Amino acid sequence: MEDLRAASPTVVVVEDEPQIRRFVRTGLEAEGCHVVEAGTGERGLVETGTRKPDLVILDLGLPDRDGVDVVRDLRSWSTVPILILSARVDETDKVAALDAGADDYLTKPFGVAELLARVRALMRRTRMAGGEGPLIAFGEITVDLARRQVIRDGSEVHLTPIEYRLLALLIANAGRVLTHRQLLREVWGPSHAEDTHYLRVYMTGLRRKLEMNPAQPRHIRTESGVGYRFVLDT
Amino acid sequence: MADTRPDPDALLARIESDAERARQGKLRVFFGACPGVGKTYAMLNAARALRDQGADVVVGVVETHGRSETAQLLKGLELLPPRVVAYQGRELREFDLDAALARKPALILVDELAHSNVAGSRHPKRWQDVEELLAAGIDVWTTVNVQHLESLNDIVGGITGIQVRETLPDRVFEQADEVALVDLPPDELLQRMKEGKVYLPQQAERAIRNFFRKGNLIALRELALRRTADRVDAQMREYRSDQAISEVWEAKERLLVCLGPGAGGDRLVRAAARLAGNLHADWIAVYVETPRLQRLSETNRDKILRTLALARELGAETATLAGQEDAQTLLTYAVSRNVSKLVVGKSLRTGLSRMLRAPLSDRLSLLAEDVDVYVVAHEAEAPAAGKALSEPFTLDREPVPRTRWQGYVWAGGICAFATAVSQAVTPWFDLANIIMFYLLGVVGVAVRYGRGPAILASFLSVLAFDFFFVPPKLTFSVDDTRHLFTFAIMLAVALTISNVAAGLRYQTRIALYRERRTRALNELGRELAGALLPENIVDMSRHHLEGLFQCQVCILLPDAQEKLYSPMLLPEHKELPLDTAIAQWVYDHQQPAGLGTQSLPGAPMYYLPLKAPMRTRGVLALLPSQKRLLFQPEQARLLETFAAQIALALERVHYVEVAQEALVRMESERLRNGLLSALSHDLRTPLTVLAGLADSLPLAGPPLPPAQAEIAQAIRAESLRTSTLVSNLLDMTRLQEGHIQLKREWQPLEEVLGAALQTLAIPLARHEVHVDLPADLPLLEFDSVLMERVFCNLLENAAKYTPAGSRIEIGARNEGDTVAIIVADDGPGLPPGREESLFEKFTRGQDESAVTGVGLGLAIVRAIVQAHKGTVRAENRPEGGARFVITLPTGDPPAIPLEA
């Protein structure tokens, strides 16, 4: 059963523009997905409730409902991965949607290849959820989650407690976008949710310890104005 | 503890005055006891020394008085040519203020600060020229003799017996930044005189020889030394208060000097000025107009007004009070103004008159409980003192009030009428009742015609009563001597009634006047409150002012270039002797000028700046039909109040306009923003569709032949580029409006660079990118999304305009207040000479080149960097290639708590 679903995952596309729905469907179907289209937020919620999809692609600029609201609604009863589509002007909406529990975003205009890459990453996350062992490897780094050890080229890298907590959080959410607020709340606590400079300084420190070229990071990537994305393999 | 803190208001005032001073030129006074001590010589010597150090020194005016030593010193100094003025057939050489202002040297020497300018100059006094030089930021050195100080004028006159006419307000001397005392012992000075080294005009030699007696010289020297010592003392005190060393926390003193009709008012004012100066107190000069004083001759009243003007010049606030009784009125006023010391002149009355009416000083002492009363000795006034005053105007006489003689005729008539009535009723009434008829008559006369006719009526009544009713009738002789007593009582009662009734009449007049004034103010205030346009205000104000001050009025308002214009030029305005140059000067300098003032007193009109809290709003020009209606202290104050109200109304209207504009701007802003996002959505959605559809074309069916796949790719690329162009255009529009909301956060530069390089990974794939940031680079405060745009645009340009394999270097360095970020490449470089114009919109480095783009990238870069208060410039590297340098302010980065 598990394998069958994985072979033909269902994706609900909530988007009011039919032409966008069309090319998204073409792309997804070429990837072997089963696509359900919804033109409004309400319709999208209904489809998600009945079809139990593996992924929801949600446009933020819907005619009937606020996209962020739809995310909140969805998250109250489902853990399905959500990929947001947004125009560049909706900067704050995008962050709000991610804060509300969306997993990733794409800014219009986007290419089909880009879309499919994101979709694959999110699907893999679901498949792998809880499945990976205590050893995580990326680049030259191996992280032993059980022993809280970080090894680089065979020797141990010393991380401060906060740095380790950050890294663990990033690994647990690999492939997703984590907003500044989410990271700050998890690591520093709710009272520091606005102190983005703490986060940025520690992220820089982490990159210097883990990245080959900290100025051009491959794993701990910055999403300007939004947050960070941890990428295991590039 | 708290007492040692400096007063915040005082501190603020000092900071403001310091700031004012910093803009102003510095005044240095070479101060001496008398002519001949070598002030000019010392000044020129010091100026030469400064000139030799390379300072820009100009001699504005220096009197050599034919002394060769002094003339020698002038050689080699730049001399400002004098202004030659023809005056009464002679050619006078005067200091040329305008030439000095135009030349604008660092330092100018202007000899003889107390000098009076020839009639027709801009200012009557040279010290006013100097004030204008200082205001223009030019340093001035000058010379002053002790006898020229206004407050010491009478003392020097007393010592030497010579009245000096050229005087200088003490404040000018007080406000000098430096005073250098030039001192010469009297014996040496006399020796120099014998040797002919001191200039003496031929004609007045004798008088002046008298002046240079050794005793005089010693006394003058002492005065000069003491004055300088006072100044040093004051500086010391100011320093102490600056450093808040002062332990004493005292309320500021306020002094009230009461001017009377007697002689010696000027002396009293000068004494009060000195006292106030010593006490560092504010002072007020008042004149109480009691009914008694109301009857003074016009000459005397003018004298009092002149004395008030002198007091104003010496720094006093002045007021005219009206009341029945001087002592009480004074005290009430003193209490209301928080006055701690009263200064009055010593009464000259002796003997009987002194017994009948105690002198003011005595009455004040009796009434005043917590106010000190100072009595200043009167002396016969030096005859020249009145003329020495620099009061530039004399008040016109009040028109003779309603013909007086009519009152006297009526006094006689009413007595006759009383007599007739008494005759008629005499059979039924006795004498006591008849007296009442007469008294009634006196009351009537007093109320209607005032004191003089009432007194006449009193006497006539007594005489008529004696003549017609007291036996023996029809003679003035009296049978019963007891009737003499009756006459005395009757006269006394009649006179008292006259007095009281006349006083009442006067009070009524004052009350009426006040009421009229208050009403006028209220009316103006009410009307101005409803005004919506400056033109309304001008019209209303003119209407009110013309009625109240009986003058012709013109109000000038500034245009956008701060030049004055008359918003409503009526035909009669053309005939006004309005001088716009004076009005402009008044507007620029924010002080009154023209008729009755210290600046250009020869002009026929009076110009008053309309000062509102924020700034001057215009100039009020008045052509009075009678000067006294404008310059009597009460009227002058009323005029000032009017001016303030008008200015306030103009300011209010101005801000209403500003608010309306802001509202309109906000509304159009909202509209435009709505339009922009709608446009952005409507343009971007089809482009997204286009790109997406082209992209999915190969996926939709069987694989495309290579040629078609290529076309699909081209469609995709073009629509993506068009989408970028749309974004750029919209962003540029937003940025240009200057209303983009920056989401500034403190962050490391490294992070945003990383994001930009990530975004441009594909275009930069064929280039070699090197990032070299110092490890200790501080956090910077910027909007990460916009700053990523900046680096994306710069890097994209670098990728676009350099051949594959070129090296792109990104570096940064901390420069203290700023951080410089450099993006450099080793490509072909920028077109020489066009580095700056690249940042303009729709400008491209290579015209019509094969590389696509519309030239918005760098314009956006500059707009974003400037929104962050930074700068960006482009240049060619000496070793080849282009370099872009962005500087951002460092600011004050927050501390990050480190982990233990």
Image (spheres, rainbow, N blue to C red):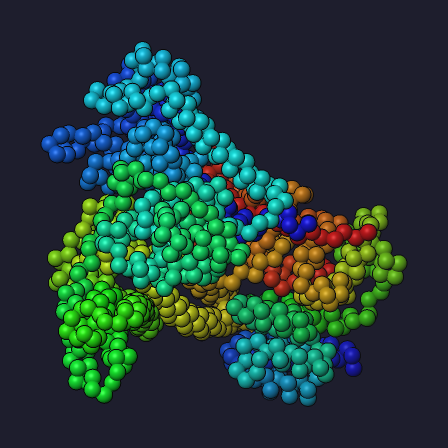
Q: Residue furthest front?
A: B479
Q: In the rendering, at what x and y percent does residue B152 appear?
A: 38, 35
Answer above or below: position of B624 versus B203: below
Rendered residue at 53%/60% (across/down): B742
The quarter holding residue B69 reads top left
Rendered residue at 63%/55% (across/down): B746
Residue B465 seen by the camera:
no
Answer above or below: position of A185 versus B420: above
Q: In the rendering, at what x and y percent does residue B244 appear?
A: 60, 43
The quarter holding residue B388 reads top left
Q: Residue furthest top?
A: B195
Rendered residue at 75%/80% (across/down): A4
The reply, left or right, for residue B750 in relation to residue B507 is right
The reply, left or right, for residue B381 in relation to residue B825 is left
Q: Residue furthest left?
A: B89
The reply, left or right, for residue A158 in relation to residue B284 is right
Q: In the rendering, at what x and y percent does residue B584 appear?
A: 26, 50
Task: Decide which of A99, B778 is in the foreground and name it.
Answer: B778
Answer above or below: position of B258 versus B656: above
Q: In the rendering, at what x and y percent does residue B540 appear?
A: 25, 69
Task: Decide which of B285, B120 is in the foreground and name it.
Answer: B285
> How many discs mark residues in the rendered view?
0
Answer above or below: position of B147 versus B663: above
The reply, left or right, for residue B680 in relation to residue B498 is right
Task: Decide which of B83, B705 is in the foreground and name it.
Answer: B83
Rendered residue at 39%/59% (across/down): B326
Residue B336 seen by the camera:
yes
Q: Residue furthest right?
A: A147
Task: Decide which of A202, B742 is in the foreground and name it.
Answer: B742
